[in-house]
Image (spheres, rainbow, N blue to C red):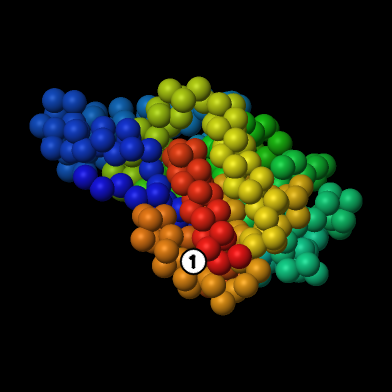
Amino acid sequence: MKRVHNFAAGPAILPQAVLEQAASEMLDWHGSGMSVMEMSHRGKHFVGIAEAAEADLRELMAIPAGYKVLFLQGGATLQFAAIPMNLLRGKTSADYVHTGEWAKKAISEAKRYCKVNIAASAEDKKFTYAPAQSAWKLDPNAAYVHYTSNETIGGVEFHWVPDTGNVPLVADMSSHILSRPLDVSRYGAIYAGAQKNIGPAGLTIVIVREDLIGNALPVTPSILDYKVQADNGWMPNTPATYSVYIAGLVFQWIKKQGGLAAMEKKNTAKAQVLYDFLDQTEFYYSPVAKSDRSLMNIPFRLRNEELDAEFLKQAQARDLLELKGHRSVGGMRASIYNAMPIEGVQALVAFMREFQSKNG
Ligand SMILES: *Cc1c(COP(=O)(O)O)cnc(C)c1O
């Protein structure tokens, strides 16, 4: 059996132990005689799987009482619309922090439903940093403040939680949820597509403060209404059953690793291997401000961009895959989510060192 080093931004690497367990349970889940894929979402087997997955996520993230956890579909992109639809609550504007490609998409979708105030932007430096709180111009009458806590493409991560006073804080955490402990009580809502750090595509997680729901815009499709979802145990219709099951296995795997504090330790050590190397070579460089570098998505560039194609070709020959940067920014990017072992990062750096010595 062959397994490569997969640095894809998403869908992305999953823990091998989870894939092995899923394989062993594929035809007969726990003596049920069925694959999870074949089960009714209302039957006792799947309901048990769903309840365990939600309970494990609540435990891992220490989600306080008073928050609803919803396992939805449609990706983070559908949440770009669902957030204003649900959280405007009679208000007409929302604050958005513009930090790059994903923030841009969230902003343009929100503009369909409300006035968007750009509270801060990192456009002046090509989205290579996280604007400091002191630079945020917040509107006290905004319905909420939205930011992208980890910009997957730019590799910019907020290592601090913004203070928005009484205005609910909303975060797109798609690419770093579960990478470290988090104080959920600081947020009005958190959402994330699963295919980066949670599980397979098709599942989207929303964590939302209960007092904010129940006031969706009248045009909101009922399936996008958080209150409808919450009142029906996130099953007003069929959820992404198999993706929920795999996510549940990932939650159990993270618990076995020691939870989010242990993940943070591992993720910090992993990222440091690559950043330390980038900082001591002239051949490659990181375009991101040191204080705002992502632990999950690490863009880097070769000073001589004419070597990019050759770099990628030789990396691929070593089974170091999916290192091409996003088409909007170019260069390289290594995504090193929870499931990436440190050995994968070490193999990448060993190759980078060798490529440099041959071409530098
Ligand atoms: C991948 C990603 C998205 C889009 O997710 P989909 O599930 O494809 O809609 C949105 N925001 C961030 C930060 C992402 O990384």
Q: Residue furthest left?
A: 33
Q: Which quadrant is home to the N terminus?
A: top left
Q: Is residue 205 above or below residue 43?
A: below
Q: Is residue 118 visible?
A: no
Q: Is residue 9 above or below residue 61?
A: below
Q: Which quadrant is home to the C terminus?
A: bottom right
* Helix, strand or loop under label 1: helix
Give the x, y percent position of residue 158. 71, 47
Q: Is residue 9 above or below residue 255?
A: below
Dot 1 corresponds to which residue?
311
Q: Is residue 175 above or below residue 123?
A: above
Give the x, y percent position of residue 81. 56, 62
Give the x, y percent position of residue 15. 38, 38
Please tell me which residue is depicted at 41% across the width and 55% down the height of the picture.
320
Please tell me which residue is depicted at 43% across the width and 23% down the height of the picture.
256
Report the amino acid beneath label 1: Phe
Please tell me which residue is depicted at 60% across the width and 35% down the height of the picture.
269
Q: Would you identify the image quadrant in which residue 216 lies?
A: bottom right
Please tell me which residue is depicted at 67% across the width and 55% down the height of the picture.
281
Mark 1, Cα crowd under 10 Å, few <14 / some 14-19 / many 20+, is many
Is 151 or 205 nearer to us in this picture? 151
